[in-house]
Image (spheres, grey):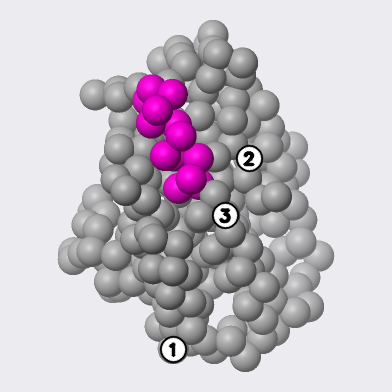
Amino acid sequence: MIRLKSENDLKFLRISGKILSEILKKIEKEIKEGAKLSYLDKLARELSEKAGAKPAFSGYYPEGASKPYSAAICASINEVVVHGIPNNYVIQNGDLVKIDFGINYQGYFTDAAITVGAGDISKDAKRLINITKKSLKEAIKTCKPGKYLGDIGFAIENAVKKEKFHIIQSLTGHGVGFELHEDPTIYNYGKKGDGMELKPGLVLAIEPMVSIGSSQIVQRNDDSFMTADGSLSAHFEHTVAITDGGCEVLTKFS
């Protein structure tokens, strides 16, 4: 069921999104060679508590998972696309680190993700980060009343295909706001004019996930997902609200 948000709801979602983006900016600064993923998770928990919010992922039961998620952030390295556990792994020079993070502020949920290269990364890795980030920007440009979910997917797919990279086919974006995951499902590929029409009050988590190699994934024993061929992957995400005037990015970094 699609649940539209009122202007009062958006007031709380803006606060939620601002808290999330401020925490992600602080985590981003700590992504460097020698840092432990567990430290980043601890930092996210501490900053959330200080802001009067709760990490939305902690205790959440992702679809297809064997158990509830145990951490505050998802920290996925290199070929791992999403749902990586922030354990005691020490970040290495050249790693691609994906941080996915959600906030629950007084019952209002926002969700965002970044990909950061640690130290010296390859030219292909830099291109992968840039095109994944660009595909999210192109998708956000299409988010306005009268457009369709298929327009979002088309914008992402078109941007990625131009660079000869690959959309991860079976991982998607989603509605968000009153819960961490709501309807509708947002595919990272599609046709213009297909699917549900975008209307004011929709709040969406748009999240392109892209690999250098395979578009397919395999699930690991810890419930994370990696590219089927072990190729590098990148992930960016913003929570956006469809408004009468177009689109508002609730998790904007500024």
**Residue, disc 1:** 88
* Amino acid type of the residue tagged 3 in the rendering: Ser
User: For mark 3, does the 10 Å Cα neighbourhood hold few (<14), some (14 to 19), or many (20 or more) residues?
Assistant: many
Q: Which corner quadrant holds the N terminus? A: top left
Foreground mark, 1 or 3? Answer: 3
Q: Secondary structure at mark 2?
A: helix
* Amino acid type of the residue tagged 1 in the rendering: Asn
Q: What's the distance in space between the residues labelled 2 and 3, CA to CA?
A: 16 Å
* Amino acid type of the residue tagged 2 in the rendering: Leu
Residue located farthest toward the left when viewing the structure as drawn: 67
The residue sitting at 62% across, 45% down in the picture is 252
x and y percentages locating residue 242 in the rendered image:
51, 23
Res. 220 visible in picture: no
Q: Secondary structure at mark 1?
A: loop
The residue sitting at 37% across, 51% down in the picture is 105
Q: Secondary structure at mark 3?
A: helix
x and y percentages locating residue 184 in the rendered image:
35, 28
Q: Characterize the magenta stretch by its predominant secondary structure.
A: helix
The residue closer to the viewer here, 98 or 227, is 98
Boundaries of the magenta span: 5-17
Residue located farthest toward the top when viewing the structure as drawn: 146
Q: What's the distance in space between the residues labelled 1 and 3, CA to CA?
A: 24 Å
- Checking the image for residue 237, the label placed there is none
**Residue, disc 3:** 21
Q: Quadrant of residue 6?
A: top left
User: For mark 1, does the 10 Å Cα neighbourhood hold few (<14), some (14 to 19), or many (20 or more) residues?
Assistant: few
Residue 173 lies within the magenta run = no
